Amino acid sequence: MYTNSFYNAFPSGTVNYNALSYYIATNQVIKYLTENAFSAEESGGWDWSRLRNINYFIVNCNSATVSEKVKNNYLGIARFFRAYFYYGMMQRFGDLPWINHPLDVNDELLFSSRDSRTLIVDSIKADLDFAINNITTAKDASCSTVTSTVAAAFKSRVCLWEGTYRKYHTEAGLASSASDWLNEAVSAAQIVMKAGYKVYTGAGVDKSYRTLFISKTPVSDEVLYAVTFDGTLGVTHASNRGWTSVTYGVCPSLTHSFVNTYLMRDGSSFTDKTGYKTMAFPDECKNRDTRLAQTIRTPGFTRITGGTTVQAAPDYAYAITGYHTCKFTLDDTQYDNVDICDNNVIVFRYAEVLLNYAEAKAELGTLTDADWATTIGALRARAGITGGLTTKPTKVDTYLQSRFFPGISDPSILEIRRERGIELSFEGFSWADVCRWKIGEMTTKVWDGIYIPELDVPYDMNGDGKLDVCFTKNLNPTKVAGVYYLYVGEKLANGATSNAQLADDGHTMVFMKDQKRTWNDKLYFYPIPANDLTLNPKLGQNPGW
């Protein structure tokens, strides 16, 4: 019963992305990337109450009447959650004080300095190794319990992060030990790969991927752990509202540059097609990786309204770049404006472990064709891709390289990064990837949207024969009934700058064109909040802040 309290650390809804991403646009200014707009006075997250709860259990789980095996099982769960807590804190702040007992009011650690990141990550690894070796359940069919396999999946995530961080952040002086952590990531992933999980394909290539995220009951073929909900008990969340309401959240949308990275069904690059830059939305969606149509609304996407299934175009009030996310939304529109969604929220799934394994092997230079087929090949096959599934790539995709990863020349690493972005889109990994790969500059790129062939011409965007949207620079256009008019000029009637404009080519939609986002390497870690630093000056501030 005590360890059940630890599970509150997991997310409570599907709107779990981070707006600090290299492929997501939002309808709000990102202060963190606005020069001189974010400071230690605004920083937050330096909260240690959850750790105290865990440490209290670890120190006091010592009854002589309970067997060592039983105690170690629950200590393993507790130490998993301590690792989970510290990993999130380490990613946010870097160096931390290592606290392994509940503090008393007079404890000297209350006013101590921070320990090094190396001590923290070594301690996280030790906790996870204990969890892997002592949690007695290896696999839970309900996907609702932390098992030894879940701990191994998490370890693969942690070790991949640390290994690549050490490799690409050479200024940290830890590059020589990067391979040790990458090998640990491989070993942890292999534990999961031998546990009987698989890439779920039960609903076919056009549905399997999205089924994972809109199912009430976790798909146990692939899901290791998920937060579950039950509408009959009133345990629900606001997923649909978060992905459909223009006032509830920040309208996260994929950029055109990122959509360009989705492959064709035959495995070729979309950006190798003649005229790809000037394709209208319905045309760019044809014959693509099926995850595109299971992540955003594309022609043929349907919803249920009043019991009737109808084709649904993107909502251009919400889809700020023209790409409307559907990956997590239940199909029935009755869920949109009330917080009654009960689809599961995935925390750990097999696909991520396969990506962790493939990336660690590629970074080590030991990725084989068999590794590729088992990992990237399997994920792409689920998405309906037919080419390049059994052998690792030998050719650099120049678009992917120049637009997103200019410092990478290894074709396998490039393709694994492509796959990671697509497979894990909006699942909360992209900011961590930015930080560990040291690609912060990518967060400042223009938020480009769909290509508009012609202004003041209504378009059918979902293929149902009805006109859906018209893009215009005219503040008072002559309107066609049933068509949504999106203004893409520079100034609104009140003189304010329009958020939706056109790029210099006069056709590509750009969102928040005038927002200047600036990168500084200090942003890889948040500042210690000013109030906490005032309480304990020995903490010291992170570099640059």
Image: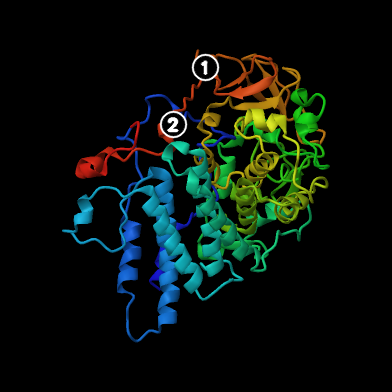
Badge 1, how many Cα within 10 Å: few under 14, some, many 20+? some
Mark 2 vs mark 1: in front? 2
Q: Answer with left or right where residue 309 lies relative to residue 148.
A: right
Q: Which residue is mark 1?
A: 497
Residue flagged by tag 2: what amino acid is it?
A: Asp
Q: Which residue is mark 2?
A: 521
- Using the image as rendered, state which of residue 245 and residue 508 is in the foreground: 508
The spot of residue 219 in percent (x, y) is 66, 63
- Helix, strand or loop for disc 1: loop
Q: Disc number at residue 152?
A: none
* Mark 2 and mark 1: Cα distance apart in space: 30 Å
Residue 503 picture quarter: top right
Badge 2, how many Cα within 10 Å: few under 14, some, many 20+? few
Residue 529 picture quarter: top left
Residue flagged by tag 1: what amino acid is it?
A: Thr
**Residue closest to the far front:** 176
